[in-house]
Amino acid sequence: MQVSYHAHSIVKIKTGNHTILIDPFITGNGLTDLQVANEKPDAILLTHAHNDHVGDTIELASNSGAIVVAPVELASYLGSKGLNTVGMNLGGAKEFEFGTVKFTKAFHSSSYTSEEDGVIYGGMPAGILFKAEGKTIYHAGDTEVFGDMEIIGKMNDIDLAFVPIGDFFTMGPEDAAYAVGLLNPKTVVPIHYNTFPPIKQDPEHFKKLVEKAEVNVLQAGGVIDI
Ligand code: NI
Ligand code: MN
């Protein structure tokens, strides 16, 4: 399985047969290497409704016919825009053709701001556990550090974790390094930093703070094979 990072919170997963995009915020993301017209995902997974996570989902899913898996209120809104959606909620898992998705807790907020429709309530924000081909990936979404990360880490053998380090809206490097101790993944990739001035961070500082996991600082387009 090929997993790549594309700046902010965008993660692309290529399994043998499917391409999955998480939080595809491409337009307005000055650091990403992706272009909306080139992406043809089979599935889009969304952690929460904020515009820097939903991003180009409507256009991408309209172009490719991707199934959109999101917290239920957000899924319902995107469904009203004509997308093929599945709405889930915290603690629930579902096996799809492309892999198993489970939504986990995140301490954050969740609303979508639309020019047409105003501010839409997005339900609970989430993290995502994705399992396919015997591997487990955890995408923390936007969150502060919380003690139940230890439960997530104990119940799941996480091969690869993506955690925000930007501070201001989410965990900063110190809190994120503590979170890694609770989650106990084999490898961790820092995300959600340097996209905007308030979340400017040095990922090498985060790397120094993490004690047990391997920290892989990926540039946009960087790939990990797991
Ligand atoms: Ni957010
Ligand atoms: Mn965000």
Image: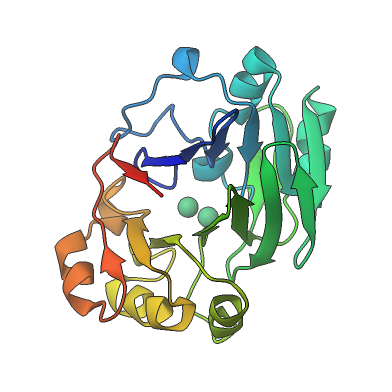
Up-down relation of residue 20 to residue 168 (above or below) = above
Count of numbered tags? 0
Quarter of the figure with residue 170: bottom left
Percent x, y of residue 118: 70, 38
User: Does residue 177 appear left or right of residue 40 in this picture?
Assistant: left
| Front residue of this view, candidates 196 and 225 | 225
Up-down relation of residue 18 to residue 209 (above or below) = above
Q: Is residue 202 visible?
A: no
Q: Is residue 46 visible?
A: yes
Please give the name of the residue rendered at 75% of the width and 57% of the height, measured from the top-left corner.
Answer: 123
Percent x, y of residue 37: 48, 12
Up-down relation of residue 154 to residue 91 (above or below) = below
User: Does residue 102 appear left or right of residue 210 in this picture?
Assistant: right
Up-down relation of residue 141 to residue 4 (above or below) = below
User: Does residue 125 appear left or right of residue 163 in this picture?
Assistant: right
| Front residue of this view, candidates 68 and 223 | 223
Quarter of the figure with residue 29: top left
User: Does residue 74 appear left or right of residue 172 in this picture?
Assistant: right
Q: How is the image coloured?
A: rainbow
| Front residue of this view, candidates 62 and 40 | 40
Percent x, y of residue 189: 34, 57
Please give the name of the residue rendered at 72% of the width and 51% of the height, measured from the top-left corner.
Answer: 122
Quarter of the figure with residue 160: bottom left
Percent x, y of residue 7: 34, 41
Please give the name of the residue rendered at 37% of the width and 73% of the height, measured from the top-left corner.
Answer: 176
Please give the name of the residue rendered at 35% of the width and 63% of the height, measured from the top-left corner.
Answer: 187
